[in-house]
Amino acid sequence: MPASTPVPPAARQLPLDLPHLDSRARDDFLPGPANRAALALIDAWPDWPARAVALVGPEGSGKSHLASLFAEATGAPVIPARALEIAALPDLLAGGALVVEDLGEGAVPEAALFHLLNLVGEQGASLLVTARRAPAALAGEVVTRDLASRLRAMPAVELGAPDDALLAAVAVKLFADRQIAPDEALLSFLLPRVERSIAGLRDVIAALDREALARKRPLTRALASELLRARDDAADAPAESPDDLASG
């Protein structure tokens, strides 16, 4: 008889890196003290304090979700600030509203932005800008004096850090987006141990989901504890010195 083929150890499943799209429907926006003023601004349109207003906050704070609600309500196109071009502005403003995302992430296209602000005023249009820093803070980084003046004058509503209740609600939603129903034990363990930001919470949940799929195990408190402990150990491990690498 031919020798039996040895059975390899159980292979770790490679999870498919499929996108998990966060729903940006109105019912999926979770209001709280950190974002209540920003949500009120969106709901107040067209009775805004100015033709151009800004939503300001860290990554994952809900700026883009609110911007998408505004775009859906008004038919506004959405464009990254870095992609603004003077020639495209009339078409972008043809419907009377526009969303410009991530102002200040990369070089500010000063000529196009200045021209856009002028057109918004001339046409009585509405412009919603999202940014991590207030437009007034960006004013010191542009060389066009009139643009700097416009940025300093632009009203901005800040989205603050989420409180415990909002973080818990967001966690449930992020798990649901991945078709996971977390139990109370998992949530109670996880929330005090992650960065207190929605972006940080999103990253941790995504990593836990990938690892649970790779290990073919349900995402429980025990598995979350194991994975977070392994992550912390890896972060605390000293980096290899050049001598270590040379001798390895």
Image (cartoon, rainbow, N blue to C red):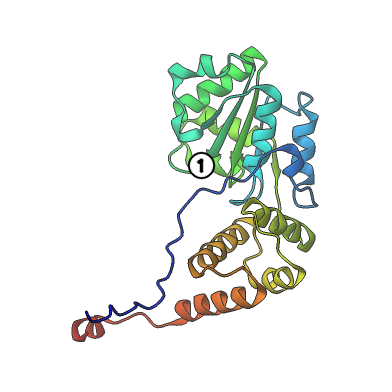
The mark total stands at: 1
Res 161 visible = no
Q: Secondary structure at mark 1?
A: loop
Q: What residue is rendered at 67% in x and 28% in y?
A: 72
Residue 122 on image: x %, y %: 62, 13
Q: In the rendered image, which quarter is residue 200 located in?
A: bottom right
In the displayed structure, 128 sits above or below 175; it is: above
In the displayed structure, 35 sits above or below 161; it is: above
Q: What residue is rendered at 44% in x and 24% in y?
A: 85
Res 16 visible = yes
Residue 100 on image: x %, y %: 56, 32
Q: Amino acid at mark 1?
A: Gly
Specify whether 70 is left or right of 200: right
Residue 134 on image: x %, y %: 62, 43
Of the pair 83 and 144, the residue shown nearer to us: 83
Of the pair 47 and 199, the residue shown nearer to us: 199
Residue tagged by mark 1? Answer: 104
Q: In the rendered image, which quarter is residue 219 located in?
A: bottom right
Of the pair 32 and 141, the residue shown nearer to us: 32
- How crowded pointer 1 is (Cα within 10 Å; few <14, some 14-19, many 20+) is rated as some
